[in-house]
Amino acid sequence: MDINWKNLGFGYIKTPYRYVSDFKDGKWDDGKLTQDDKVVLSECAGVLQYSQSVFEGLKAYRTKDGKIVTFRPDLNAARMADSAKRLEMPVFPEERFLEAVDMTVAANKDYVPPFESGASLYLRPFMFGSSEVIGVKPATNYQFRLFATPVGPYFKGGIKPITIRVSDFDRAAPRGTGHIKAGLNYAMSMHAIVDAHNNGFDENLYLDPATRTYVEETGGANFIFITKDSKLVTPKSDSILPSITRRSLCYVAEKYLGLTVEHRPVKLEEVAEFAECGLCGTAAVISPVGKIYDHGKEICFPSGMENAGKITRKLYDTLTGIQKGEIPAPDGWIREIK
């Protein structure tokens, strides 16, 4: 193994072990670690024909005192269960999900980057329909897999605000699948994000699909807003993916920083009144937003385009401090890998 931890990017690097379990005849097998990274499927597999797949994303870290830990993996297990139910897939038991995480991280512990590098071991649990399906119906057989890959810090040169646009595309349908982590949702966002990049924007701001007046999320992250009197506001909608990072930031804001937190519908027309804006998710924790472009009109936040806003920075530093073991964590947030 020859990895330059300081210059590690955010991409796939094959590690020795991954976890695999198959669902057949109405039950999951015992599961195992394997060194085989190849998936062999029928050309008629359910995942290939009708996109029956769900996934998760989380990280393992080395803390300051040398421990290897994961951050709130129980919430990933629960969210994956919800996603599977929505796509008529068998639920991979939540306790077994946690065991798979522990086993995969422990088996690849040499690939957990050193604390001082700022890097981490990214974990990708996913599940898909593996049996043949030609009629439009759920598959009968499924496979759960979990692989690990070391990734560098999302922000190498420090947190810099990004520019996003109000998208003309819809991310999800009313009463659709926007609230679950299904591969098909991300496939639908590919054209919109490529189009945004081609036009000089970092991301899309999606509006609610029914009225197109309320802020929802981006292609892969929830919004947080900071009011001018230092309240944290997050958009509320049935078609927003419940971000684990966002939920954690809300707790940190209230319990650690003493801020008032509001989880409510947010109209696009009120966004210009906020002092700070950010996108939150597993990869970056928070990406500050400096400017939103709305069809010829610019919404510029007082926090500016040079640095993250004051509250956004405090939220980022506190949550990452908890993850790294530098700040005491709430009970149950940190799971140590032995």
Image: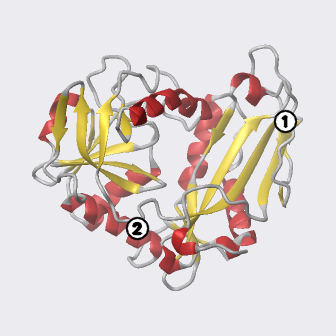
Residue 181 in the figure: left or right of residue 124 = left
Amino acid type, callout 2: Thr
Residue in the image at 75% along x and 70% along y: 107
How far from the left and from the top, in percent, is residue 2? 69, 75
Choose the circle earlier in sequence order: 1 or 2.
1
**Residue with the mark numbered 2:** 320
Residue 198 in the figure: left or right of residue 135 = left
Residue at the outermost top position: 135
In the rendered image, the quadrant that contains the N terminus is: bottom right
Amino acid type, callout 1: Gly
Residue 152 to residue 56: above or below: below
Residue at the outermost bottom position: 65
How far from the left and from the top, in percent, is residue 29? 86, 48
Residue in the image at 36% along x and 30% along y: 206
Residue in the image at 57% along x and 80% along y: 67
Q: Which mark is on residue 26?
A: 1
